[in-house]
Image: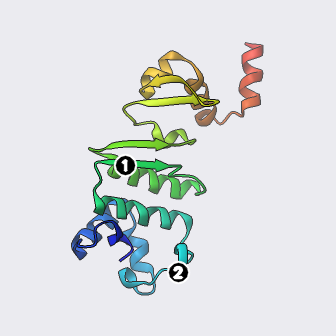
Amino acid sequence: DNIRYGKLDATDEEIHRAAEAVGADDFIHRLEDGYDTVLHERGQNLSVGQRQLISFARALVADPRILILDEATANVDTHTEKTIQRALDVMLRDRTSFVIAHRLSTIRNATRIVVMREGEIVEIGSHDELMAQDGIYADLYRMTFTGLSTEEVAAAETQG
């Protein structure tokens, strides 16, 4: 019933489809009682990533017109982040979404990205537009995906 929480009249088929769509079906089947497993308080018998996938399945079943996510990929390992990223791609499709994220991989495919610094909006655009602006977003993206630390990027910029 955990996935059914947002739509109490959801059918078992809707629950299974949502779990499959976000990549939760495999681990759910590995639980002791599968879809009938009773979860502990706050889902303590699940990993952080598993709890996140369950919440994504719940959101898919509820099918809200507007979806707000805060740090959807925080506190997960790289493998789990990739699973969550695929789930996000499914979940965000065809709906208005506000995604608060520090990990750029979470927002790269967004139609519009709003970059904030010290509470102020400093850049707005798509990934490609922000990369072309060569501002804060582009700097963060290069640091994130080239494997350079902030200090290494700063040192390279002062030497260049």
Residue 116 position, x and y percent, is: 57, 30
Where, quadrant-wise, is the C terminus in this rendering?
Answer: top right
Cβ–Cβ below 8 Å for labels 2 and 1? no
From the image, tell me which residue sits under label 1: 67
Residue 7 position, x and y percent, is: 28, 67
Which residue is at 50% across, 43% downward? 100
* CA gap, disc 2 and disc 1: 26 Å
Alpha-carbon neighbours of circle 1 within 10 Å: few (<14), some, or many (≥20)? some
- Name the residue nearer the viewer: 57 or 4: 4
Side (left or right) of 91 relative to 71 = left
| Dot 1 amino acid type | Leu
Alpha-carbon neighbours of circle 2 within 10 Å: few (<14), some, or many (≥20)? few
Which residue is at 52% across, 74% downward? 43
Find residue 10 and report its image quarter. bottom left
Secondary structure beneath disc 2? loop
Whichever of callouts 2 and 1 sits on the residue coming sooner in the sequence is 2
Residue 50 position, x and y percent, is: 49, 67
Where, quadrant-wise, is the N terminus in this rendering?
Answer: bottom left
Residue at the farthest front position: 119
Number of marks in the rendered image: 2
Secondary structure beneath disc 1? strand
Side (left or right) of 77 relative to 20 = right
From the image, tell me which residue sits under label 2: 40
Which residue is at 39% across, 60% downward? 56
Above or below, 99 relative to 6: above
| Dot 2 amino acid type | His
Residue 64 position, x and y percent, is: 30, 53
Above or below, 48 relative to 99: below
